[in-house]
Image: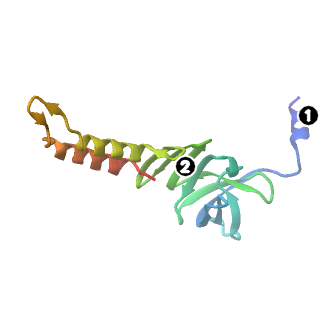
Amino acid sequence: MKDIIQKLADNGNEMYAKICEVVAIDLNEKTVDLQPLDGTAEIQDVFLMVGHENGGQCLEPEIGTLVCVVFISKETGVVVNYSQLKTYNLLIDDVQFNVSSAGFLIRKKEESLGKLMVDLLTEIRKMKFTTNTGSTILLVNEPAFVFLENRFKNLLKEN
């Protein structure tokens, strides 16, 4: 049975992998150009992901770092492992999750969690309450809200 399955799946190409250094990145096409460590010729247009037109998961390596590329045919390779990432991006329909050294981006359509948190804290700092003697005009703990806003800005990206 194993032999029959192998014969059916055999297309004449043997899969193999190489360790390479990233020399260039094209984020629009979701490809990289690589220099194999074994001294063979540079490999161009290796896929970071397959079918990126509909979203999915894309990991962007740093230029100069090492990746493992698996060749599924003599002409087609896909990066499957990374020594160092620059960004991680996940897109499912209109929901995006992005991680980089700048922070986290969580977005659905045009709304991001970072922008939502900043807007919320801005409105909290503008709050006024009516008392028996009139409205309050001073938010006593405003510095605490400014501090919280800056902490959110350091964690979450707005765009």
Residue drawn at the location 62% of the way across and 54% of the way down: 68
Relative to 56, 136 lies left or right? left
Percent coordinates x, y for residue 111 in the rendering: 48, 44
Q: Inspect this view and state whether residue 104 appears.
A: yes
Report helix, strand or loop for mark 1.
helix
Percent coordinates x, y for residue 142 in the rendering: 18, 44
Mark nearer the N terminus (1 vs 2) = 1
Residue drawn at the location 34% of the way across and 46% of the way down: 118
Amino acid bearing label 1: Ile
Q: Residues within 10 Å of mark 2 (few under 14, many from 20)?
A: some
Amino acid bearing label 2: Asn
Report helix, strand or loop for mark 2.
strand
Q: Is residue 92 above or below residue 43?
A: above
Q: Inspect this view and state whether residue 84 appears.
A: no
Residue drawn at the location 66% of the way across and 51% of the way down: 49
Q: Nearer the viewer, residue 112 or 125?
A: 125
Q: Nearer the viewer, residue 66 or 156?
A: 156
Q: Is residue 22 above or below residue 79?
A: below
Residue identified by numbered label 2: 89
Q: Which mark is residue 4?
A: 1
Percent coordinates x, y for residue 50 in the rendering: 70, 50
